Image: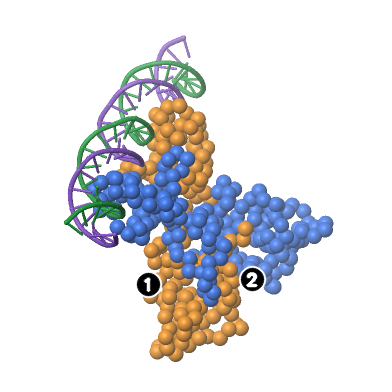
Chain colours: A blue, B orange, C purple, D green
DNA sequence: TATTATAGTGAACGACCGTTCACTTGTCAA
DNA sequence: TTGACAAGTGAACGGTCGTTCACTATAATA
């Protein structure tokens, strides 16, 4: 049996069950009757780098889940570092979230960041506990209201800049709290 | 031990190992010495709906991985159906990809869709084999070039509309191929 | 104080785990 | 034609799996 068929079947199993099948299950999936056949196939998969064994000897997926074939740029053709990274981390969860315990999701309303490509209805992954740098997009609490803005620290004051000409910069007088930094933006159409 | 501590530890284990720990491993993680303690804890987790057993009796995560606490709208407060869905599917992979075998990832270059919030450097998930509807964003191959545009079918012709005033609509004469439909957009800042 | 949950221990169970070994079959090259 | 090799079978192994049972300790309640 060809390695592509095997990885494809593993992929769809993992996508359905969120775990890798046992050897016995792989027998059923691939159509073998002997677990030894699986043993050798897994050896191949490890050699190819599709799966690996973790510290406890359990099988875990590795390079299997570029479900997703990265085709490269629309106009150019070569994969960029980000795609390599995604190929290796292989899951959007890992790609989009660095600190799961410090991250949460917000749905955006309002158009104050529309020129930064953040539209109403988009989801943003926000991570807290990080020091914002100039140019970061932050979720700020100003006088009790939450708002999404560019962060800009000048000599003695902090400026919150919208990405929309119709809005004005906010220079908070008191009570500014940076809730978190936007680390990624997600939009779903269908 | 409190259920929140347990789910937190499970979460971080799953995020690191991409699988749930065995009962013996949970003993180590939670600090118990008897697997029976784990047995009862898992019973609780099932009752709460955090985990479930799949068709083969194996433990799989269910509602555990709102790693990510959805806080609701920035301005409003109630979670929308999309967030509920994300909470239940619990993984960005499932949220963003419907058909893993028919999806791939493209890095966007060019500014032709910038007013739709798709900027150069963004990643788009493209699904093929679907019939585009008016208003869908599609990847089209026109005379050998790949391009990202709004799809508009009129009575007798197809129009590809950019989301950028500086660009002109394309009315393909021959050789138009719809490569796929953009189902989601991803942008990562850090 | 006596009673009753609640939470954890520890040993034992049968089933399944991944692995190994010996064997068969088919294919391709020398 | 023979030898080597790849691919699959089937049985057996020790270990780990989830589960169950009987027991203890602590805390809450009557």
In this rendering, the count of numbered labels is: 2
Q: Secondary structure at mark 2?
A: helix
| Quadrant containing the C terminus of chain B in the rendered view | bottom right
Q: Mark 2, residues whose alpha carbon is within 10 Å: few (<14), some, or many (≥20)? A: some
Q: Nearer the viewer, residue A59 or B187?
A: A59
Q: Chain of mark 1?
A: B
Residue A173 visible to the viewer: yes
Vertical comparison of A53 with B174: above or below: above
> On screen, C11 above or below C30?
above
Q: Nearer the viewer, residue B3 or A41?
A: A41
Q: Residue at x 50, y 86 (%)?
A: B170
Q: Position of residue A3 (x, y in %)?
A: 35, 58
Q: Secondary structure at mark 1?
A: loop
Most extreme residue toward the right, as rendered? Answer: A156
Q: Is residue A53 left or right of residue B58?
A: right
User: In this figure, which residue is indicated by the disc labeled 1?
Assistant: B129
Q: Identify the disc placed on residue A115.
A: 2
Q: Residue at x 42, y 66 (%)?
A: B103
């Amino acid at each position: 049996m060809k390695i592509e068929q095997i990885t494809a079947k593993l992929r769809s199993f993992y996508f359905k069950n969120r775990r890798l099948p046992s050897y016995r299950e792989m027998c059923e999936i691939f159509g073998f009757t002997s677990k030894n056949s699986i043993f050798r196939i897994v050896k191949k998969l490890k050699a190819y780098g599709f799966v690996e064994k973790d510290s406890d000897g359990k099988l875990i997926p590795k390079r299997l889940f570029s479900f997703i074939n990265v085709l490269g740029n629309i106009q150019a053709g070569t994969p960029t570092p980000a795609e390599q990274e995604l190929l290796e981390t292989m899951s959007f969860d890992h790609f989009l979230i660095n600190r799961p315990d410090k991250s949460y999701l917000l749905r955006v309303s309002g158009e104050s960041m529309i020129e930064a490509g953040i539209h109403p209805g988009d989801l943003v992954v926000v991570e807290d506990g990080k020091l914002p740098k100039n140019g970061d997009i932050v979720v700020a609490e100003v006088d009790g209201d939450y708002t999404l803005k560019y962060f800009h620290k000048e000599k003695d004051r902090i400026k919150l800049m919208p990405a929309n000409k119709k809005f004005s910069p906010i220079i908070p007088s008191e009570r500014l709290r940076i809730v978190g930094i936007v680390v990624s933006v997600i939009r779903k159409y269908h």
